[in-house]
Amino acid sequence: MFEVREKSVILENGNEIPLVGFGTWPMKGDECYHAIRKAIENGYRHFDTAFHYQNEDAVGRAINDAIEEKKLTRSDFFVTSKLADHHKMPGTPTKMIDHQLEKLGLEYIDLYLIHSPWSLVPTEDLLSMEKKKDASGKLEMIDTPLTETWRELEKAIKSLGVSNFSSSQISDILKICKHRPQMNQVECHPLFPQDELLHFCHEEKINLTAYSPLGGVSREIAETKTKNFEFMKNETILKIAAELEKDPAQVLLKFQVRRGIIVIPKSANDERQKSNKDLFSFDFSKEQLAELESMNGGKEGRGWTEERVSHSKYFPW
Ligand SMILES: NC(=O)C1=CN([C@@H]2O[C@H](COP(=O)(O)OP(=O)(O)OC[C@H]3O[C@@H](n4cnc5c(N)ncnc54)[C@H](OP(=O)(O)O)[C@@H]3O)[C@@H](O)[C@H]2O)C=CC1
Ligand SMILES: O=C1CO[C@H](CO)[C@@H](O)[C@@H]1O
């Protein structure tokens, strides 16, 4: 199975995931809690979190409170979380699933992703966000094979996926897996549309989720780039938005969902949360689509270059 419906996708394993989800990074604590409560009121049911975001407690609290107060049930929600880069030593992934479930206060996670293919070395305290660095200040790496992490995870969770993986890294998993990867979550926007990876994943019945779909690449990274990641000021996006009488963000998000790509925009703002979900009553003309496709910036279009981990044996790009 793998079916794109109007507002959701049926994953290969039969689970239904809303096409428009809600990104929770970099919010934490009460800010995150209130943004999610608002998002639930605004109709969001799919939430993206991770150990790395240090907000799983707030995400779970918001969902559980909404279930209690709003007559919703756990099965109304789709929650994605992720295995952190410094939790890959054999035996650790299983422990972390238990820890993350406890933080979330949920009985299950709908989709659990390996956050990145590279693996970092933790300090003595596994729960700390500190990672070991060598004498020159470089992050230390371990070379746990991705296939070993996958085998351990699939004993504990049946709905698994990856993030920031290349097609060849996914192929390695496909050779050994009992439970196939359901998702690859990657950076995706008109400057970096991921056409080849999308083709590969859809052929393999693996879905793609677009992170930073609004160009929410961190400012420090964006400033080192020659391309402009400020899509809300981009001439092409503004022109198409004006023609359609939509917001620039709606143009960016529609560009993905019409390709069957799931989006997880983050917004703490009520109005922006509402408009980011309102994507299903308009479409682009052929000309508009061609203009959006012509924004493809090739390799330079990637915002998250992750140079800090480029010395990893498993660096994907
Ligand atoms: N797997 C991975 O490695 C990664 C995953 N992610 C996930 O993807 C999610 C989304 O990516 P992210 O990088 O946050 O970036 P986004 O592309 O979602 O952009 C978020 C930014 O856009 C603003 N924004 C939201 N809606 C609008 C709108 N309608 N008009 C104008 N501005 C708007 C937000 O501000 P405001 O809140 O004020 O509206 C925020 O500053 C993350 O939250 C996280 O869950 C992100 C990076 C890496
Ligand atoms: O998901 C993510 C959000 O932000 C992080 C930066 O601190 C990224 O490294 C990460 O992949």
Image: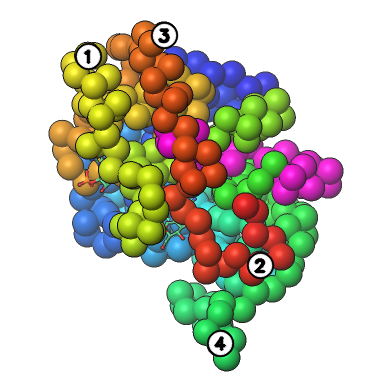
Element type at mark 2: loop
Residue behind mark 1: 243
**Quick check: can you spot residue 115?**
yes
Determine the image quadrant of residue 189: top left
- Estimate how packed mark 2 is, as few (under 14), some (14 to 19) or many (20 or more) residues with alpha carbons within 10 Å: some
Residue projecting furthest to the top: 285
Residue behind mark 2: 312
Residue behind mark 3: 286
Q: Could you tell me which residue is drawn at 25 percent across and 29 percent down?
A: 235
Q: Amino acid at mark 4?
A: Ser
Q: Amino acid at mark 3?
A: Lys
Q: Which residues are magenta?
A: 168-193
Pick whichever of labels 2 and 4 is earlier in the sequence: 4
Gap in angstroms between the C-alphas marked 2 and 3: 42 Å
Front tag of 2 and 3: 3
- Estimate how packed mark 3 is, as few (under 14), some (14 to 19) or many (20 or more) residues with alpha carbons within 10 Å: few
